[in-house]
Amino acid sequence: MPQILSALNYFNHILIPYILTFEHVGLAFSVTVCVVALLECFPVIGYLMPGMVMLYGAAAFALRQDLVPSYIIFMAIGSFLADIMSYYMGKRGDVMMMKHVEKRKEVVEKIHGFLRKYGAAGIIIGKNIGVIRPMISLIVGTSDMSLRKFLMTSWIASVIWPFQYLISVYYIKKYGGPIGVFVQRFWIVLLVIVLAYCVIIWLKKRMLHKK
């Protein structure tokens, strides 16, 4: 109970005043980053959406608009929430998720290898590897790792994760020449990529339906 009260006190006195200072753009940006990060780290869904592209684009926007703190905080929150939900689905033995685990045996073996080799640090490493990220918390939920240890490690991993995108975009913009211009105009590029992705999925469904 003291830890819960302490967390609520921190939220009321620090996070809420911080959120209230946002302009509309900042609020929309923060919510978007949080949702994209959550979906990118969620089992199954994380493999179906162009989350990495969107998060790289958001990192470019954050660097241009001085929204880096918002980017880090809300990306970490989205990631952490996805990890908690995934962990409990693994712990509960969710039927749908366990079927997904059985279909991805190679990925599951890699995750078990990470956990055997690096222990809790494997969660931090796996968070930065696209093929492992959506599954690692689900697999950890099926192991004997304690909830307290998982939560602590998952939060550290979630806070570190945004820097992968921020640092990459910063150096691309600084030293990339034409690539830097490309990144600066990411909203147009991002929109085209998302629309193209949706069209491809729609066409695939149409073709399968005709067969």
Image (cartoon, helix red, strand yellow):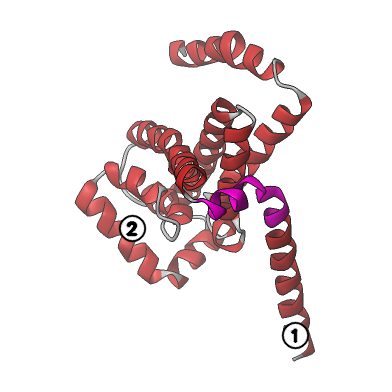
Where does label 2 land, which residue?
Answer: 111
Residue 95 lies, with reference to residue 68, above or below; the image says below
Q: Is residue 161 magenta?
A: no
71 or 95, which lies in front?
Answer: 71
Residue count near mark 2 (Cα–Cα under 10 Å), binned few <14, some 14–19, many ≥20: many
Residue 94 lies, with reference to residue 24, above or below; the image says below
Query: Residue 102: x and y, percent?
Result: 44, 69
Q: Of the numbered discs in the image, which one, if any, rests on residue 207?
A: 1
Seen in the image, is 147 located left or right of residue 120? right
Quarter placement of the C terminus: bottom right
Tell me whether circle 1 and circle 2 mark residues in contact (CB < 8 Å): no
Query: Residue 201: x and y, percent?
Result: 71, 72
Residue count near mark 1 (Cα–Cα under 10 Å), binned few <14, some 14–19, many ≥20: few
User: Which residue is painted at 70% across and 59% down in the image?
Assistant: 194
Q: Is residue 182 magenta?
A: yes
| Magenta region | 177-190
> Which one is closest to the eye, mark 1 or mark 2?
1
131 or 181, which lies in front?
Answer: 181
